[in-house]
Image (cartoon, rainbow, N blue to C red):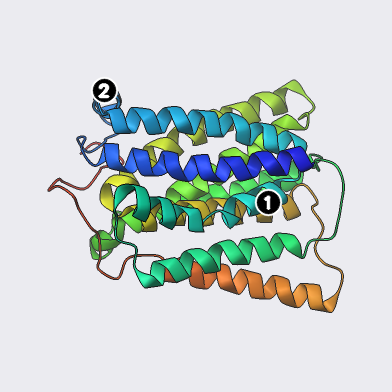
């Protein structure tokens, strides 16, 4: 299990750096559209920044899958969340991006809250990959409904200025859907129909998550979009670890109080993370479209 946690720490750093590279690259490309997937892909691949970020993200994904096969998902995602502050450090030091004071606070609260949640979980051993069909179908179905609601809401005219934030939340939910499915696959999903279903879910949600993440990065600032994607994805997968894979909660009143505090910190973090300046654009361009018009 210790090896899995160490891999998760490396994944946190690699994922943040890859996301910043992709943000720099995709802001120089044409807005992505599901109606023109090949043209969108060619435009992104033409950017050396985005290509480098995509390659680094692929390495991080392989390490992430390895971590999930060796350690409980709640601990893996908490370690990833604990590296949230490195996002602001990398963004400011390497790319010269402005990080607002409230965003530093939001990243610290979000990472700290998720780390506190994991720290208050009882000690347990093994990878905790066992699950019931009812539990995973119910949880993944709930995430699908939530993602569908966010996807519909992002097109509302009154939310146009926060489209990047909503797309980041949607991408985080899609990453969580794929992550829960991957965790189930690493533990041996049982029957071939279940394996095929989980594999299809992983591929579909993974592809949509990548597309939506690019759309979010093209619509908003690096800190708010990357940070929100991470907070939503990690929080959902930690919850999935508890509800689907049986990662235990604290049995003591103090532990439960700390876990409620951790959840409150995560919620406050998500509220503070969006930039107070509004959507920041490096170039004039129409908003990315999730569907052709």
**Residue placed most toward the observer, 137 or 253:** 253
Above/below status of 276 relative to 98: below
Q: Residue furthest left?
A: 284
The secondary structure type at the circle numbered 2 is helix
Q: How far apart are labels 2 and 1 at the CA level?
A: 35 Å
* Residue 244 x %, y %: 74, 48
- Vertical order, 286 against 165 (above or below): above
Residue found at x 71% / y 44%: 5
Asked if the residue at tag 1 contacts the one at tag 2, i.e. Cβ–Cβ closer than 8 Å, the answer is: no
Can I make out residue 136 in this image? Answer: yes
Is residue 118 shown above or below 95?
below
Q: Relative to 69, is 199 on the left or the right?
A: left
Packing grade of label 2 (10 A; few <14, some 14-19, many >=20) is few
Residue furthest out toward the front? 93
Left/right of residue 193 with respect to residue 9 in the rendered view: right
Left or right position of 66 against 41 = right
The residue that mark 2 highlights is 42
Q: Position of residue 229 (x, y in %)?
A: 46, 51
Task: Say which label, 2 or 1, has the lower sequence index.
Answer: 2
Report the number of numbered marks: 2
Q: Residue at x 83, y 78 (%)?
A: 253
Q: Quadrant of the C terminus?
A: top left
Q: Is residue 154 visible?
A: no
Depth check: 240 or 35 in front?
240
Tell me, for residue 240, which label it has, or none. Answer: 1
Residue at the (64%, 37%) spot, across then down: 181
> Circle 1 sits in a helix, a strand or a loop, which is it?
helix
Please tell me how crowded label 1 is: few (under 14), some (14-19), or many (20+) other residues with Cα within 10 Å.
Answer: many
Residue 156 at what x, y percent from top left?
28, 59
The structure residue drawn at horizontal position 37% and vertical position 36%, both measured from the top left corner, is 211
Image quarter of residue 1: top right
Question: Which circle, 2 or 1, is nearer the viewer?
Answer: 2
């Amino acid at each position: 299990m210790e090896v899995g946690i160490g891999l998760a720490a490396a994944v946190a750093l690699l994922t943040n750096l890859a996301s910043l590279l992709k943000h720099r690259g995709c802001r120089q490309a044409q807005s992505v559209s599901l109606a023109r997937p090949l043209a969108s892909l060619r435009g992104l691949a033409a950017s050396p920044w985005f290509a480098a970020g995509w390659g680094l993200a692929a390495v991080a994904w392989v390490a992430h899958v390895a971590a999930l096969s060796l350690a409980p998902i709640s601990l893996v995602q908490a370690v990833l969340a604990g590296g949230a502050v490195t996002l602001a450090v990398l963004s400011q030091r390497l790319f010269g991006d402005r990080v607002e004071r409230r965003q530093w606070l939001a990243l610290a609260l979000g990472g700290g809250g998720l780390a506190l949640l994991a720290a208050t979980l009882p000690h347990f051993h093994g990878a905790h990959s066992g699950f019931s069909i009812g539990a995973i179908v119910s949880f993944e179905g709930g995430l699908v409904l939530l993602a569908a609601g966010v996807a519909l809401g992002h097109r509302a005219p009154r939310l146009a200025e926060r489209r990047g934030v909503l797309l980041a939340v949607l991408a985080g939910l899609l990453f969580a859907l794929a992550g829960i499915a991957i965790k189930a696959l690493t533990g041996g999903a049982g029957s071939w129909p279940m394996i095929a279903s989980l594999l299809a879910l992983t591929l579909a949600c993974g592809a949509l998550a990548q597309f939506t993440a690019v759309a979010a990065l093209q619509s908003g600032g690096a800190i708010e979009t990357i940070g929100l994607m991470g907070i939503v994805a990690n929080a959902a997968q930690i919850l999935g670890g508890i509800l689907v894979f049986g990662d235990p909660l604290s049995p003591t009143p103090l532990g439960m109080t700390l876990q409620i505090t951790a959840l409150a910190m995560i919620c406050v973090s998500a509220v503070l993370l969006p930039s107070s300046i509004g959507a920041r654009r490096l170039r004039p361009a129409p908003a990315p479209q999730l569907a052709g018009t």
